[in-house]
Image (cartoon, rainbow, N blue to C red):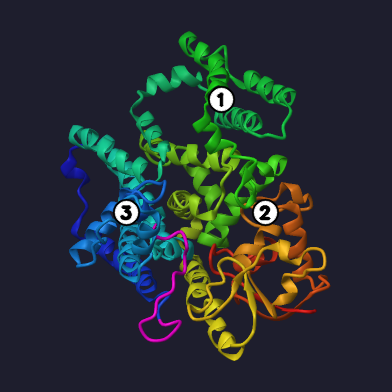
Amino acid sequence: MNPAQARISSRQVMALAAIFVLALLPRLYSAQALGWGWDGPGSFNLVNFDEGGSCRAALDGFSYSGFVGHQTIAIASALGMPPPQGVHGESALAKAYCHSAGHILVARSWSALLGALTVVIVAVLCLQLLPKKPAVAWSAATLLALSGFHISHSHSGTVDAASTLFIYSFIALLAWSLRCGSRGGLVASPVLMLFAVWTKYWVFAVFAYLALVPRRAWGEMFGGCGWARLTALVLALSAWLASVCNVAYPAYGVLPLLLLYFLLVPWRQVHRRWALAWAALPLLLWLGTLLEVVQAYTVGGLESRFGSGYAAIAENKWLRNLVNVPALLMVSLGIPACLFIPAGVRAIAHGEGDSRLWLCLLPLLAFLLFMAFLAPVTYYRHYLPLLPAAAILAAVGLHATRWGRNRWLLLVFFSWPALLAWDMVSDYHLDPRRELRPWFAQHGDARVFTSFYVNQPPAAESVLFRPEYATGDAAILRRGDYLILSENWYDTAFANELNGPLVLKQDRLIKTRPEYAQFYRQALAGEHPHLVVEQSWELAHFMPEMLLHKRWYGNVQLFVGDLRVLRVRR
């Protein structure tokens, strides 16, 4: 196709501009409003303790990618807020600058802008994938624009929104280049791929270039394998690899999965040169798992400075990883949209659009398999790149059915995620930590212990609590009057996105110790002999997705959660 034929019309440009404004307003408002005024006019409190990490890395004060940090520092410097002299290599000074109100405001606003641009890029991508169905583009982009989870991570000064933008910009450019036959686009695409990888070490981007493989080669590789068999083959290989990367799985336990894999390969249909590749693939993957860097990203360590490491989850990792994906999509897009995702997958499998262009999204499929089977670190924000792909599938599914023409269904389809976004983003604006200000004012003479993430007023005196203070006769604990606990710290003792739904074995919990988990469970249940729950501030929700998540997995947000005030009994 001639590139001129793939141009976006003026009407579509106006629609993209409207969607951009729809996406930008809530993201930018929260980016500039959160954390201000808690302790009086002009005061600022850090809400998300992961913010500024890339900035600290850019100043050689933290081990992370500094790509986005260099951008935010450059913007802050242009606005008259450069880093102080001598900050490079000094972790404390780097952290102070990157967590300062001025830089955080810049980092959040930049993230909000990139998050809103991601919505536009998703629409542009859909216009390449399904040019004859522009309704899919507008539906997918609107879903993402209204996603409370995407809004939440776009108004935070982290790299997640930026990473997602660069990933989809690269995929959109590659899809456009293939559709139009543009060599210039293909030549330029590695630059965006570098951005996608560099922002957050997202190496899955390279899989997009498999779309350049000729159709004939795909036929030789899979031998005309049907969708059902191909899916079973990929799942068997993924499950086998997950077994290899699980510290609790005995070596002999991987043999049945490996045998299943070999039974599913269509040996008689594949070309001879590919038969050897299929036979060698498990061996090559196993050799890869022996590399230390691969083990770090697939297994994790058994110990950490907080107690247990990510590998400690052992056999519970299976259910945790498989549950997290639908749980995250449910609270991000809403139940109605998620119900259409299978229809979207089915429509694509049956030939909706150009299959070669859909191959540009292979990085997301590889990432989905990684998060569903291998990932040891499963904080929800790591799943953000999956969200636009899920929105696209939901939109494809919607318009592949008669429901896409039902106005009342469309009203529900888009109103639901808007209400869900209101429910989720309100957590930040109604942060329970704000309630601590009057509490500390009323208990000025009290001796207070606090956990991490309580974020008490700067002038308030408190001692950082350790569960060891409550052991034995609790001599240290009984020196105080109150203990304030943040859900974002004590949730390590309960089901959440790191522990998964199975939490009976306390030695399988992550970032804690069995004795710590036992203490938090006893204290919050009112069973500890020296503590009694006196007051609590809880996040309030009204949408079923948020209520279900709170019931089984706790609150969705990482650094905003319930607070408990426990009075010490001497």
Assign the magenta stretch its main secondary structure.
Answer: loop
Given residues 350 and 43, the one toward you in this image is: 43
- In this rendering, the answer to whether 494 lies above or below 458 is above
Mark 1 and mark 3 lie on one chain; the one further toward the N terminus is 3
- Give the image quarter of residue 558: bottom right
Q: Nearer the viewer, residue 397 or 173?
A: 173
| Residue to which mark 1 is pinned | 290
Q: Mark 2: which secondary structure?
A: loop
Tag nearer the camera, 2 or 1: 2
Identified at 50% across, 21% down, the residue is 222
From the viewer's perspective, is 112 left or right of 10?
Answer: right
Badge 3 is on which residue?
A: 69
The reply to whether the magenta stretch includes residue 309 is no
Q: Amino acid at mark 3?
A: Gly
Nearer to the camera, 321 or 488: 488
Which comes sooner in the sequence, label 3 or label 2?
Answer: 3
Kindly state the secondary structure of the residue where label 3 is placed.
helix
191 is higher (above) or lower (below) than 520: above
Amino acid type of disc 2? Thr
For marks 2 and 1, give the CA distance: 27 Å
Q: CA distance from mark 3 to mark 2?
A: 31 Å
Q: Quadrant of the N terminus?
A: top left
Magenta-highlighted residues: 37-52
Q: Residue at x 22, y 57 (%)?
A: 74
**Residue under the image location 39 percent in, 54 percent down:** 91
Quadrant for the C terminus in the image: bottom right
Residue 288 or residue 330, whichever sits in front: 288
* Residue that carries the numbered disc 2 in the rendered image: 512
Image quarter for residue 435?
bottom right
- Residue 134 visible from this viewpoint: no
Q: Amino acid at mark 1?
A: Leu
Q: Residue at x 35, y 23 (%)?
A: 214
